[in-house]
Image (cartoon, rainbow, N blue to C red):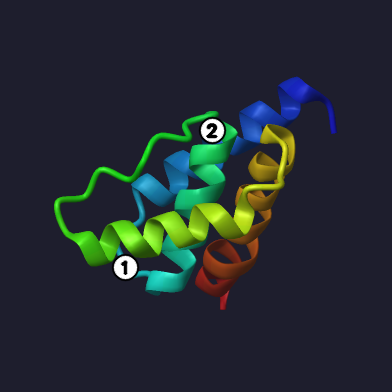
Amino acid sequence: MTNDKLHKEFLESVEYVNNYINPLPADLLLKLYAYYRIAHKNFDNPGSTTPLINAFKANALIQAKNQSTDEAMQNYIELVNKEIKNKDLK
């Protein structure tokens, strides 16, 4: 996949998630969070005011840390397609 196509699909997937109105499982949200942050090269500490949420977010980032930005974008797209879009079609 070309870099431009990857970026376009990533942005479309992010927009899809941002506009999604049904509740999503916490583990899915954490994976999406980690992929999004890595794709944007944002390695700052999580900014929640709740320590437990920060711990879960930090753990998700640690689990995904060995990915490149392109891999993180691709994983984000695949996760949205598999876990959200495909389930909406059923």
Cα–Cα gap, marks 1 and 2:
20 Å
- Name the residue type under label 1: Asn
Tell me if residue 1 comes above or below residue 24 in the rendering. above
Tell me if residue 66 comes above or below residue 24 in the rendering. above
Tell me if residue 2 comes above or below residue 76 in the rendering. above
Q: Is residue 47 left or right of residue 50?
A: right
Residue positioned most to the top? 4
Closest to the observer, 2 or 90? 2
Q: Position of residue 85 (x, y in %)?
A: 56, 62
Q: Is residue 70 left or right of residue 81?
A: right
Q: Position of residue 59 (x, y in %)?
A: 47, 61
Q: Is residue 40 left or right of residue 24?
A: right
Q: Which residue is painted at 40% across and 34% down in the image? A: 44
Q: Quadrant of the C terminus?
A: bottom right
Assess disc 1: are there few (<14), some (14-19) or many (≥20) residues with their C-alpha within 10 Å of its C-alpha. Answer: few
Closest to the observer, 84 or 72? 72
Q: Is residue 71 left or right of residue 85?
A: right
- Name the residue type under label 2: Leu
Q: Quadrant of the N terminus?
A: top right
Closest to the observer, 9 or 58? 58
Identify the secondary structure beneath mark 1.
loop
Q: Position of residue 63 (x, y in %)?
A: 60, 60
First in residue order: circle 1 vs circle 2 = 2
Numbered badge on residue 11: 2
Numbered badge on residue 22: 1
Identify the secondary structure beneath mark 2.
helix
Q: Which residue is painted at 56% across and 47% down in the image? A: 35
Q: Which quadrant of the view contains residue 11?
A: top right
Assess disc 2: are there few (<14), some (14-19) or many (≥20) residues with their C-alpha within 10 Å of its C-alpha. Answer: some
Q: Which residue is painted at 14% across and 51% down in the image? A: 49
Residue positioned most to the left? 49
